[in-house]
Image: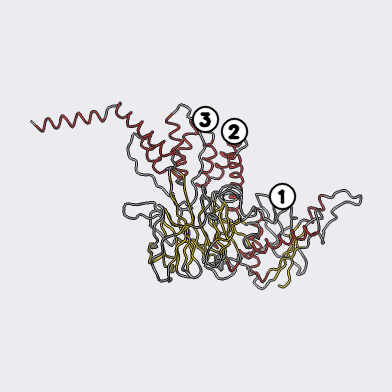
Amino acid sequence: MKWIAKLYIVCAIGATLASPGLYAQRSAGYLKAADKYFNRAEYASAATYYEKYLNAGKGVTAANSDPYAVMQAGVTGNVSSPGNQRLTAIYHLAESYRLLTDYTKAAPYYKEVLEADDKQFLLAQYQYAVVLRTQGEYAAAESVCSAFLKNYTTVDEWHAKATAELANLQFIQQQLANADTAKYVFHKPVDGKAGASYAPLWLNASTVLFTATWQEGNASHINRLYQATYSNGNFTDVVKTNLPVVAAHQGAAAVSEDGLTLYFTAWNVVNGEKHAAIYSSTHATVTDAVWSKPVLLSAAINATGSNTQQPHLMPGGKQLLYVSDKPGGQGGYDIWYATLDSKGQVIATANAGKVINTPGNEQAPYYHAPSGTLVFTTDGRTGMGGYDLFYSKGTPGYFAAPVNFGYPVNSVKDDMYFASSGKGEDILENVLFCSDRSATCCLELLALQVKPAPVAVKPEPVQQVTEQPVVTVTEPLVVIPRNPAQPMVLNHVYYTLNSAEIQPASFPALNQLADSLLANPHMVVEIGGHTDSTGSGALNQALSQSRADHVKAYLVSKGVNKNRISAKGYGSDKPLAPNTYPDGTDNPEGREKNRRTEITIIRK
């Protein structure tokens, strides 16, 4: 009769486990665990337990996690519980998936929350708009974002974020309408591996150092450095770098020109907070597979209480670009640079300044020496949404206003960690960068090739240059003047007021001009910058020259040989119309005509 007793015991246990009281106890345990992980910013674990709580513990697998992040996790809004415990859990689940960049899973939960109570969970409107944007639902995202701005009357960071998101949505639709995607070919050099792969660094024309969070034994989502051979668009012979471990995560590295010194980021995450710093390591020869015990860089770079990460060495090894949230910046994460002595010791550090940094976050600096161009990513400027890649001509301390690469280099998700092995002026030659555009959770390495694609030129009426940006552009640019040596005003070229920064609304016109120059390879042109008479002659001269230089830099970035373009600033010396009326009063229309950028054919 023992089997009867055993059966009775099993049945009794089953009945106990199925009892409502015990399930309620387990449900409360799931919620408690989920809230604990959520408050610690451990969103993968939080999502798993919120799913268990909401789905009676059934059919839930561990959530995808990607701490690709040498980036800081996003900031969630504070929501006071409305007394509806389940609805709050749904909102936190949506937030967890969003912060894991799993937007597909986040979307239905935001929708459910807003349909149930869009007043209590007001921030969910903005966050849902962001998610809709990543899903390509731009009209819906714009509608939801506009509704949020109408309902959210407090002027604070959330209002600013939503305003920026609305501008991004308009920029996205303008970019998609005007992009020449046929020229751009994307390829995944690493495919079929679970986890993130990012932060590429060309060691030579065929060897790449990068960071990945690939499964190793029982450990997953641990960032480590890898090296691979790059051949025919693919990574082969992938090996993990033999670097002593000083933190849970290590990656995002730079290497000296002689190959003997490695700078890298090491970081831990404690109670949801990241603690990152830059270390250096050496080895005796480039063939030595083992690196020395890492040494923490000085406090001049690794400021106490701050995160410092993503080192990049300038040509010659005398300056180190890096990213930090330490005091003295413009807000969020900023790009900084340190001057190094012959032994690699820090002499001085400086912020890259307001030209580069914004109140948002700037990340992943890279310097392309052949073209003298800084490339970085930011979420603080108008773009495709998330992090966009920008470029800026110059050197540390003397950078020009950044320009957005536009679509399809940038996507509606995060795009960052740019690296080019090109030896010429074309910065888009032999490019590796990272994006989560086709991933559910993680950054992936992408290879980019650009094919010249000349297009036919159609002359159209011209429009004068103004100081005001326009988001939607419907008229094409007159790209080639009919008469050589006759200056022609460029249509739809806009700058930030009193700045040389080219507004994103100018990109379609400048892209058409670049295509026309590529289609006429023997043509040599001058880009002329002009101002009105407001301000001193010296300032107007400098501003007009800088604007002409920026237009030239943009055209060069699109593949036009720099030797075919000259840039000259004329200040206010060549007005098209009077700046004032005969009685001395101001002539606004005349000033508007005089603020312009012109193209002149020097040789056909």
> What residue did someone put label 3 on?
120
510 up-or-down from 120: above or below: below
Residue 558, image x and y in percent? 61, 64
Q: How is the image coloured?
A: secondary structure
Q: Residue 34, image x and y in percent?
A: 39, 37
What residue did someone put label 2 on?
151
Residue type indicated by callout 2 = Asn
Q: Residue furthest right?
A: 583
Secondary structure of residue under mark 2:
helix
Name which of mark 1 and mark 3 comes first in the sequence.
3
Q: Quadrant of the C terminus?
A: bottom right
| Spatial CA span between label 1 and label 2 | 28 Å
Q: Nearer the viewer, residue 388 or 290?
A: 290
Residue 379 is situated, as x and y percent measured from the top left of the image, at 56, 49
Q: How many marks?
A: 3
Q: Is residue 596 visible?
A: yes
Label 3 secondary element: loop
Task: Using a 10 Å C-alpha cutoff, classify the residue at mark 1 as few (fewer than 14 neighbours), some (14 to 19) or many (20 or more).
Answer: few
**Res 440 seen here:** no
Q: Is residue 73 left or right of residue 369?
A: left
Query: Is the Cβ of the residue at disc 2 closer than 8 Å to that at disc 3?
Result: no
Query: Who is closer to the viewer here, 579 or 265?
Result: 265
Badges 1 and 3: C-beta atoms under 8 Å apart?
no
Q: CA distance from mark 2 to mark 3?
A: 11 Å
Q: Quadrant of the N terminus?
A: top left
Residue in view at x 69 percent, y 59 percent = 477
Mark 1 or mark 2, earlier in chain:
2
User: Residue 517, located in which quarter of the rendered image?
Assistant: bottom right
In which image quadrant can residue 402 be found? Answer: bottom right
Local SS, label 1: loop
Kindly identify which residue carries mark 1. Answer: 468
Label 1 is placed on what type of residue? Gln
